[in-house]
Amino acid sequence: MGTNTITWNSKRQQTVALSTCEAEYMALSHTVCEGIWTRKLLKELGFPQPTTPIHEDNQGCIALVKNPVQHHRTKHIDVKHHFIREQVEQGTFKVIYCPTHEMKADILTKGIAAPQFKQLRDLLNLRERKGI
């Protein structure tokens, strides 16, 4: 909340993706589901939310969200994943490009080099514990 992470999730996808773009699109679908739940919780606590930004580093995935035309390359993707478009059109969520080197989630999902780890740790407002 504010500049701090309040929830995150990492799990193996239950469906097979044929490309990185599809994998990102499916992960984005799960992110929107989590975002809907979090928005409802915050509203109940008295913190109604404006449009929720979602940062994405795959430009193909962003194009897929923004383009309402069904492409022949995406017709096999399960329909449940396409509700992302509805949420973006309604203004509930906005998908924003984030360069890969600034993707905060990478610290939680990938093995990364120490300099990038420290940079992302600082972006998440996490502090190094001394004496451990």
Image (cartoon, grey):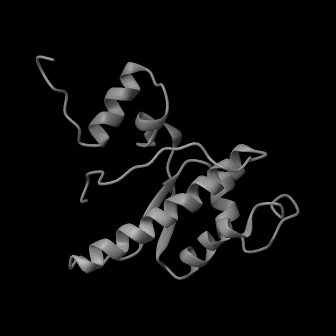
Q: Position of residue 48 (x, y in %)?
A: 29, 79
For residue 8, above or below residue 121: below
Q: Position of residue 90 (x, y in %)?
A: 53, 82
Report the front residue among 13 and 46: 13
Judge from the rendering whether residue 29 lies leftward or rightward of residue 113; answer left or right: right
Quadrant housing the N terminus: bottom left
The residue positioned farthest toward the left in the image shown: 131
Q: Position of residue 89 (x, y in %)?
A: 58, 79
Q: Residue at x 58, y 62 (%)?
A: 29
Judge from the rendering whether residue 58 lies leftward or rightward of residue 132; answer left or right: right
Quadrant housing the C terminus: top left
Q: Position of residue 117 (x, y in %)?
A: 37, 28
The residue positioned farthest toward the right in the image shown: 72
User: How many numbered tags mark residues here?
Assistant: 0
Q: Residue at x 44, y 71 (%)?
A: 36
For residue 98, above or below residue 88: above
Judge from the rendering whether residue 27 lies leftward or rightward of residue 107; answer left or right: right
Q: Residue at x 41, y 74 (%)?
A: 51
The residue positioned farthest toward the bottom in the image shown: 90
Judge from the rendering whether residue 96 lies leftward or rightward of residue 116; answer left or right: right
The residue positioned farthest toward the front in the image shown: 14
Q: Residue at x 75, y 45 (%)?
A: 19
